Image: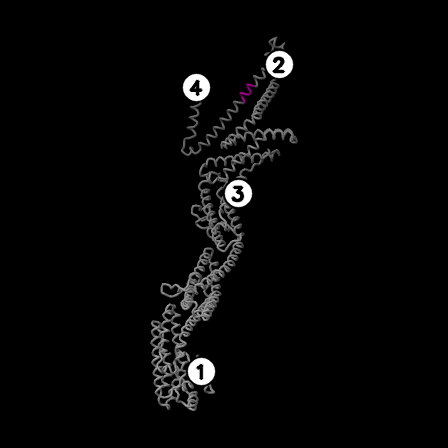
Amino acid sequence: STMEETDREAVATAVQRVAGMLQRPDQLDKVEQYRRREARKKASVEARLKVQSSINLSYQLILRTLNFTGNEELRQNHLYITYTELFSSLFPHAFIVLYLFFVFCLCWFTFFFSFLFAVVSVPEIVRETQDLIERGELLQAHRKLMDLECSRDNLMYEQYRMDSKNTHDMNLIHTYFGDMQKLSEELAKQLWMVVQRSLVTVRRDPTLLVSVVRIIEREEKIDRRMLDRKKQTGFIPPGRPKKWKEKMFNILERTVSTRIEGTQADTRESDKMWLVRHLEIIRKYVLDDLLVAKTLLDQCFPPHYDIFNRLLNMYHQALSTRMQELAAEDLEANEIVSLLTWVLNTYKSAEMMGNSELSPEVDVHSLNPLISQNVVDQLLSKYMSTLTSNIIGWLRKALETDKKDWIKETEPEADQDGYYQTTLPAIVFQMFEQNLQVAAQINEDLKTKVLLLCLQQMNSFLTRYKDEAQLYKEEHLKNRQYPQCYVQYMIAVINNCQTFKESIISLKRKYLKIEMEDTLSSSHASMDATLDIIAKEGCSSLLDEVFMDLEPHLNELMTKKWLMGSNAVGTICVTVEDYFNDFAKIKKPYKKTMTIEAHRRVVVEYIRAIMLKRISFKNAEERKEGAERMIKEAEQFRFLFKKLAAGSGEDTEGLCDIIEAIAEVIKLTDPSLLYLEVSTLVSKYPDIRDDHIAALLTVRGDASRDMKQTIIETLDQGPSQPNPNYVPIFKEITVPTLTVPKLLK
């Protein structure tokens, strides 16, 4: 048939046209462009056909109308066609005008009836749209909503054009389409719910999110069109511009803020680590969200939305606000550190914004600080102030705890080398270490400040430690049976001094830059001096303890009982050795100092016993016996202290030599040689005073007053040849009664 042939020709022509368009491979990229062009041509042809059809219809309508309204006489006389033709031939232009008038009327009636149909069906379309929204078919719902809005807007526009001041009719139209406004709000509500959950939706149902973005884009286009029309005509429909894109970003911003704020699950009352936990949750959430935004969300939005960078800025702003809120709270020292560490370090680290998967979109160097330097400085100042009072409190508490140990009935613990110690140095320096490690997390400057603070407080603490050790000694002297382990704990106090010294050096080496050494030199020297005083006083108090026990035996020296064969020196040696079994638990160098001091004090007490003139030998026999006993006892002392000083490399010979030199003066049998013997003694030990010589001669028992006077006066002019290593010993020894008017040389 003719129709089939026409169809075949059309297909063949189309194939030929397509073949002509797609002759080269690169033209395949333009297929979509060709398709759109052909679609436009087709639409144009169809429009022309519709016009032609309309003209035909109108023409027929005119003829029917003429036929219906024509004069009966004309019809009866069969003149209708003749007149029509005549009319057409005589008045061609009038016919065209009449024709166009009828076309216009027809078009207007067609528009009116189609519009009337649209207006009448508004409630039905509203219900359908509502159902689509409830079923989640948002794109279709929006399409219907657009149709409704278009009908309303066109009607209002026509009303505006006819009578812009007729608000009554405008309100009538607005009221009639009132449900449509509710639909728009309901649809918007659904969109914002999707937007709020966009980071979840994009993983589960990205199509839904894309639909929402398409709807927002449609509305943006309508907004732009309506604003353009407003510029031209002054008319804009109610509710325009909707600004849904702006609202979407506002909702995203609120969602981000809520997400950041909602991560605080605990308070300080419920969990001391609340802030650490809060910050860690924020870190994890923000990193996860930004990774999703970069990999998935970015693909659901048009490029001009720049969604990732917009979200990045929202998160940064929300974090900045949250950090400032936290900074304004009454934070404790450890909380300030947690916050500053997170803000200054964690935020830009590989654990968060510096994550390699966020690169290159996120450049940590271009991120503004979360809190201002002024706020950082205020927090650091508060931290240092809080830390200062905390350290003072911690040190006081540590010392109080240590003092309680001093009165225990059990011995203190020993370290791996067997030296007595208490836990005080370990507790103090562990506390310092913890605070320095925490400060180091923030920056070098704070670490140095904290170190200076620690050592400054250490200085004050050591003064208190010295006072407490002194009080401990004084309390013990009131009742020497209490505390039971006084000696052992005093040894521990002495050893602690050495531990403190080593720990200070270690702390400085670990946390102080070499260029800062000078700033601490005076402070360090002051601490060392205080520690030496504590140790020295501790050693002295222990030796006091020894000599209090030795006192009755020292009182026996140089008495008749002693001369008759008392074992006082034997007992002295056993007692000293017994004490030094405990003193072996004293660390070097204090143990070495103790041994030297004990040796010195024993010799001083022995010489003091001689100078007390408890005995005056009656004859050469007694002098010989007494002198030999003195030499023998000097040898006992020498042997004892050599044994106690084993391994220290200390020369202990010289002190006992003094006893032997005095014994030689007493032992001398020829009085004429007495001056010579005394002068030899004085030249070796030039701190011997006249009263010492007088006392010594009194003990000899055979020197007259004049002889003493002569010897003393002659010695005044004599030269002295002391040993360069000699430490004066006689100046510590007082003689009870003055035997000569001249005391000093």
Q: Which callout, 2 or 1, points to the residue nearer the camera?
A: 1
* Residue at left offset 52%, top offset 38%: 192
Element under disc 4: helix
* Residue at left offset 52%, top offset 22%: 49
| Foreground pick, 135 / 59 | 135
Quarter of the image with the C terminus in it: bottom left
Q: Report which quarter residue 727 is drawn in.
A: bottom left
Structural distance between the alpha carbons of marks 1 and 3: 95 Å
How crowded is the residue under tag 4: few (<14 C-alpha within 10 Å), some, or many (20+)? few
Q: Which residue is mark 4?
A: 5
Q: Amino acid at mark 2?
A: Thr
Structural distance between the alpha carbons of marks 2 and 1: 166 Å
Task: Examine the rendering and report whether any part of residue 197 can be seen.
Answer: yes
Structural distance between the alpha carbons of marks 2 and 4: 44 Å
Quarter of the image with the N terminus in it: top left
Q: Which callout, 2 or 3, points to the residue nearer the camera?
A: 3
Q: Which callout, 4 or 1, points to the residue nearer the camera?
A: 1
- Residue range (magenta): 51-57
Classify 362 as above or below 640: above
Structural distance between the alpha carbons of marks 4 and 1: 154 Å
Q: Which residue is mark 2?
A: 69
Structural distance between the alpha carbons of marks 4 and 3: 66 Å
| First-in-chain label (2 vs 3) | 2
| First-in-chain label (2 vs 1) | 2
